[in-house]
Image (cartoon, rainbow, N blue to C red):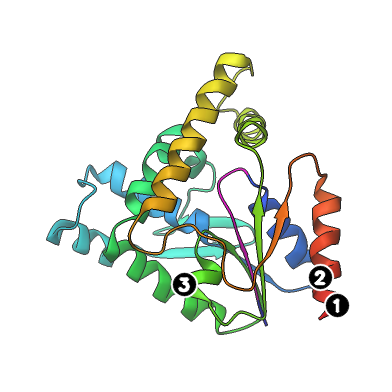
Amino acid sequence: MIITIDGPAGSGKSTISKMLAQKLGISFLDTGAMYRAVTLQILNSKTPIAESAQMENLLDSIELKLDGGRIYLNGRDVSGEIRAAEIDRNVSKVSELRSVRVKMTALQQKTACRRDYVCEGRDMGSAVFPDADFKFYLDASPGERARRRAEQLKRNGMLASIDNAVLARLKDEMIERDRQDTARELSPLTVPVGAVVIDTTGLSLRDVLQKIVSSVDKK
């Protein structure tokens, strides 16, 4: 069984996907973390974000492993590093590269074919798993998503305090990333055909989880 949960950054899809996988007793595939880990490797190696032989060689050298909610890049736990602001600013550009998407899509499909999965991302139900058993698309207002992102950064020790200036900057970054994700030629962010759309603005995590579980139970 494959359940896909797509949506923009800050919509709550990662947290809800983890909760849903735990509730159903199945595995969770955090594809967003996978793209972030690749972005981290590209930035650390100072490889230009463009199609090139250098990029192909770098991608061939990357090994990713998801284990217990952590992500390992070439054997190193980078779960905290991939949440940095610099990754936020560059992950959409990296995701636009055909070579990156081809590698990630193949790895995601290979991983999920082994057992039941909740798969979270931006093109899970539309491109990677178009025949998924259940599809959901989570969204929220840019302001709400910026607030959630600020709280996440603060929890991870990457933000000392939250004020209006921080929220405004994060909101602008969210809007720009939405523009990049929806405008890209390859696998753009979109509502998958047949997906249940849930606006999570003002809803608690429990409320969103219940909506998804109820929808699954009905089918």
Question: Which residue is denoted by mark 3 in the rendering?
Answer: 127
Residue 135 lies left or right of residue 53; in this view the side is right
| Distance between mark 1 and mark 2 Cα atoms | 5 Å
| Distance between mark 2 and mark 3 Cα atoms | 22 Å
Circles 1 and 2: CB distance less than 8 Å? yes
At a point 44% along the width and 52% down the height, the residue shown is 182
Residue 10's x, y, as percent? 61, 43
Question: Which residue is denoted by mark 2 in the rendering?
Answer: 215
Q: Amino acid at mark 3?
A: Ala
Residue 214's x, y, as percent? 86, 68
Residue 171's x, y, as percent? 55, 29
Q: Please tell me how crowded label 2 is: few (under 14), some (14-19), or many (20+) other residues with Cα within 10 Å.
A: few
Q: Earlier in the sequence, mark 2 or mark 3?
A: 3
Question: Which residue is denoted by mark 1 in the rendering?
Answer: 218
At a point 43% along the width and 55% down the height, the residue shown is 35
Residue 110 falls inside the magenta stretch: no
Residue 5 lies left or right of residue 186; in this view the side is right
The local secondary structure at tag 2 comes to helix
Q: Is residue 179 above or below residue 219?
A: above
Front residue of 82 and 189: 189
Q: Which residues are magenta?
A: 3-10
Q: Which mark is residue 31?
A: none
The local secondary structure at tag 3 comes to helix
Q: Please tell me how crowded label 1 is: few (under 14), some (14-19), or many (20+) other residues with Cα within 10 Å.
A: few
